[in-house]
Image (cartoon, grey):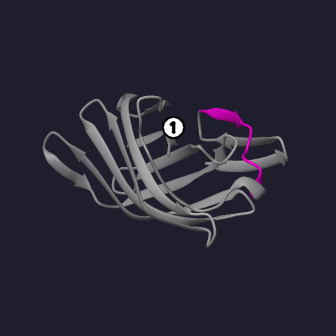
Amino acid sequence: MLVTRVDDELVLVATSDYLAQVNPTSIANLSGSHNYSTTVISSFIGSGSAGDISDVIAGMQVDFDSGAISQGSLDILVNDQSWAIEFDGSVRHGIVDLNAVNGQLFDNSGLISNSIDANLGGVFTGDTGDAFVGGFDLIDEINSFNTVNGLYTIER
């Protein structure tokens, strides 16, 4: 998972298999505290070792004035697998740094891993940071053949 600022007008959000070209929000327009979550206009694309992603539900609280990102959650459904990641992070100079603080992988039989290597990131877009474009690369550290990666949007 890699977030690369090309210039003031373009940021690349890349995972193992997916790439988004995003027009970032001007840093001067990022202010206040906001909640971001999955809405009817949210979108996602991705796949993993168990197939294509069928749903992504995500959310986080962002305080642009302090740069703090808290109460982050990312739930990804792939066939009978459910990946659940909790994260926090920061936003500095318009670039978002996210850190997983907890990760679990479930299937129909229950918990199959609580050791997830999560590489997360993204960028805010829209006139005032109305949306967030995020990417993820997840690997089950107990069974490294269990993987999933993709892109998603959430809005405030």
Q: Residue at x 70, y 42 (%)?
A: 127
The amino acid beneath tag 1 is: Tyr
Q: Residue at x 67, y 49 (%)?
A: 2
Q: Residue at x 74, y 38 (%)?
A: 23
In the rendered image of this protein, does residue 35 appear above or below residue 78?
Answer: below
Q: Nearer the viewer, residue 122 or 9?
A: 9
Q: Position of residue 141 (x, y in %)?
A: 39, 57
Q: Nearer the viewer, residue 102 or 65?
A: 65
Residue highlighted by disc 1: 152
Q: Position of residue 115 (x, y in %)?
A: 35, 61
Whether residue 78 sits left or right of residue 127 in the image: it is left
Outermost left residue: 109
Whether residue 107 sits left or right of residue 44 in the image: it is left
Q: Residue at x 59, y 43 (%)?
A: 130
Whether residue 47 sits left or right of residue 18 in the image: it is left
Outermost right residue: 7
All told, the count of numbered labels is 1
Whether residue 41 sits left or right of residue 108 in the image: it is right
One can see residue 145 in this view: no
Q: Position of residue 78 (x, y in %)?
A: 33, 33
Q: Residue 17 falls in which quadrant of the image?
A: top right
Instruction: Please tell me whether residue 84 belongs to the stretch shown in magenta.
Output: no
Identify the magenta region: 18-27
Outermost bottom residue: 66
Q: Residues within 10 Å of mark 1 (few under 14, many from 20)?
A: many
Q: Position of residue 139 (x, y in %)?
A: 44, 50
**SS label for mark 1:** strand
Q: Residue 28 falls in which quadrant of the image?
A: bottom right
One can see residue 19 in this view: yes
Q: Residue 51 falls in which quadrant of the image?
A: top left
Instruction: Please tell me whether residue 24 belongs to the stretch shown in magenta.
Output: yes
